[in-house]
Amino acid sequence: MYEACLKKAVLGLLSALLCLLSAPAQALIENNMKCSNSNSSGELGNVAPNTRFTLVMEGSCTITRWYPVGASLQFVQSKPIGTPPSVMAFYLGTGAQLPEVPVGTPGTVCIPISCQPLRVGRVVPYSVALVGITAATTGQHWLVVQLTDTSIGGWHNYGDYINSLLIRYTVTAPSCSLTSPGTVNLNFGTLRNDSLQNVSQNTSVSLNCATALQANVTLASNQQTMDAANGLSTTSLSGLNMAARWTDSNTAVSLNSARSINLRAGDNSLNLGFTPRLAAGASPAGSFQAQYTLTIDYR
């Protein structure tokens, strides 16, 4: 009697386990639409770090299985090589940002424009903009973006991978090289105190850059600064000052403050002018010198 009850208990436990294990998993059902695509090229080539880019993934899909409520659009991304920053995706039909979720996760951004039933044979176009920025570190970087659709309204086990784009680029360190001498000497010759307003010396600093980039340019005087905003500093001769200006814009150099400029790929020049100025009530005599350091910080 005891043995019979034990056997029944074991059978009952096995039956319960079998019931738990026999519940089928809901697999993704694909081939609900057939799509043709026309994307931007994801080959960006050699790029500077932290450079913004925009690519387009677009195409049209023919519905092959009925979507009773509608089809939402979403995307996933992976990074097989390097450390590229993630991109954001925007549906150009409405401007809405796509959610980054796996296929089978229904969303609220639908194709073609609004969430609506899609019958077999209907053709629905789509266009998605990918907005990103290149990596900050040098080397190769790959980013794979996949667009997916999911049937909404309780039918989320129906979905497809409808488009894929490989974004590939190599970040190179930005570089510029001076093509003019690193040290420039300007000779003012013999000057008269009563005609200094007509005297100036100009110079150009030339450089060649491998890629277009942004730079901060700073001019610092090695003498005492008298009026930084107007580019005025002393010289080695008491009573004689020197004013610096950018000759491209004919504006005073703001000493010790960075000026942001855009350097193009290829040849560039930075143009400076220097004009002696008498200190108030001074009538100096003798030789003088004034030294400056120009710093170009590009990234």
Image (cartoon, rainbow, N blue to C red):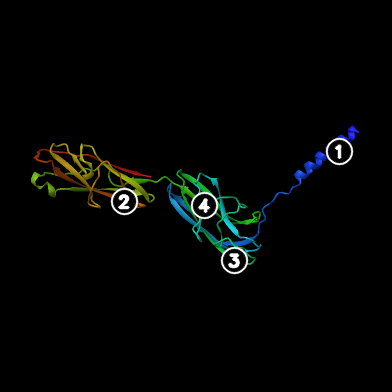
Distance from disc 4 to disc 3, alpha carbons, whole Å, reads 27 Å
Q: Secondary structure at mark 1?
A: helix
Q: Earlier in the sequence, mark 2 or mark 1?
A: 1
SS for dot 3:
strand
Residue visible at 44% across and 51% down? 52
Mark 3, residues whose alpha carbon is within 10 Å: few (<14), some, or many (≥20)? some
Nearer the viewer's eye, disc 2 or disc 3?
3
Circle 3 residue = 123
- For label 4, the residue is 167
Q: Is residue 224 above or below residue 115?
A: above
Looking at the image, residue 118 lies above or below residue 283: below
Left or right: residue 226 versus residue 13 is: left
Contact? badges 2 and 3 (CB < 8 Å) = no
- Mark 1 is surrounded, within 10 Å at the Cα level, by few (under 14), some (14 to 19) or many (20 or more) other residues, namely few
Residue farthest top in this picture: 2
Mark 2 and mark 1: Cα distance apart in space: 91 Å
Left/right placement of residue 5 relative to residue 160 reads right
CA distance separating discs 1 and 4: 62 Å
Front disc: 2 or 4: 4
How many dots with numbers?
4
Name the N-terminal-most of marks 2 and 4.
Answer: 4
Mark 3 is on which residue type? Val
Q: Position of residue 45 (x, y in %)?
A: 47, 52
Tag 2: amino acid: Asn
The residue singled out by tag 1 in the image is 8
Q: Is residue 58 visible?
A: yes
Q: Residue at x 84, y 37 (%)?
A: 9
Residue 146 makes an appearance in the image? no
| Residue that mark 2 sits on | 268
Dot 1 amino acid type: Lys
